[in-house]
Image: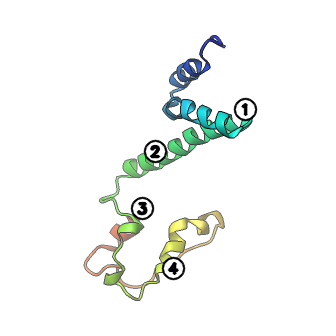
């Protein structure tokens, strides 16, 4: 341990050495919340680490999408269901959760392109 004079300064230093910027950003704010709400040391540590892990997972996903080299970046939120009214919003939302992946289930897409005039591979690449 560096020194107990200012533990938050130590946390900032350790976070910088570990290349964990979210820990550095959230440690002081969460420490104040922990004091006011009576959190245990474990609760505080879990909250700080949770912020870092969540941010890393999010940025990791974004990096993998960028490195995949998809021709365009699309999301389900941008999808215009007016172009294909027969498409079930609920089914698309379910598929968007990826639950079928964790259950090792297959998804088969049949029929013409989801949006007329666009290549099917473009629609299937949408993330």
Q: Name the residue under label 4.
A: 90
Q: Percent from the top left, x then y, of residue 108?
A: 51, 78
Pointer 3 and pointer 2: residues touching (CB < 8 Å)?
no
Q: Calculate the distance from the C-alpha at mark 4 to the C-alpha at mark 1.
A: 42 Å
Q: Mark 3 points at which residue?
A: 127
> Which class describes the residues within 10 Å of circle 3: few (<14), some (14-19), or many (20+)?
few
Q: Calculate the distance from the C-alpha at mark 3 to the C-alpha at mark 1.
A: 38 Å
Q: Calculate the distance from the C-alpha at mark 3 to the C-alpha at mark 2.
A: 14 Å
Number of the front mark, 1 or 2: 1
Q: Percent from the top left, x then y, of residue 15?
A: 54, 25
Q: Percent from the top left, x then y, of residue 101?
A: 59, 65
Pointer 4 and pointer 1: residues touching (CB < 8 Å)?
no
Earlier sequence position, callout 3 versus callout 1: 1
Q: Calculate the distance from the C-alpha at mark 4 to the C-alpha at mark 3.
A: 17 Å
Look at the numbered disc 1 and give the secondary structure of its residue: helix
Number of the front mark, 4 or 1: 1
Look at the numbered disc 3 and give the secondary structure of its residue: loop
Q: Name the residue under label 2.
A: 59
> Which class describes the residues within 10 Å of circle 1: few (<14), some (14-19), or many (20+)?
few
Number of the front mark, 3 or 2: 2
Residue appearing at x 42%, y 49% in the figure: 62
Earlier sequence position, callout 4 versus callout 3: 4
Nearer to us in this view, 92 or 23: 23
Earlier sequence position, callout 2 versus callout 4: 2
Q: Name the residue under label 1.
A: 41
Residue appearing at x 64%, y 67% in the figure: 104
Q: Percent from the top left, x then y, of residue 93?
A: 50, 73
> Which class describes the residues within 10 Å of circle 4: few (<14), some (14-19), or many (20+)?
few
């Amino acid at each position: 341990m560096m020194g107990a004079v200012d533990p938050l300064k130590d946390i900032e230093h350790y976070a910088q050495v570990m290349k964990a910027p979210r820990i550095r950003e959230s440690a002081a704010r969460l420490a104040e919340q922990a004091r006011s709400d009576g959190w245990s040391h474990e609760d505080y540590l879990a909250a700080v680490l949770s912020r870092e892990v969540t941010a890393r997972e999010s940025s990791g996903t974004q990096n993998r999408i960028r490195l995949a080299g998809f021709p365009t970046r699309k999301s389900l939120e941008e999808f215009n269901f007016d172009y294909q009214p027969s498409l079930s919003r609920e089914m698309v939302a379910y598929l968007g959760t990826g639950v079928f992946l964790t259950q090792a289930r297959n998804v088969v897409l049949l029929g013409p392109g989801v949006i007329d005039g666009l290549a099917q591979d473009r629609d299937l690449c949408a993330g």
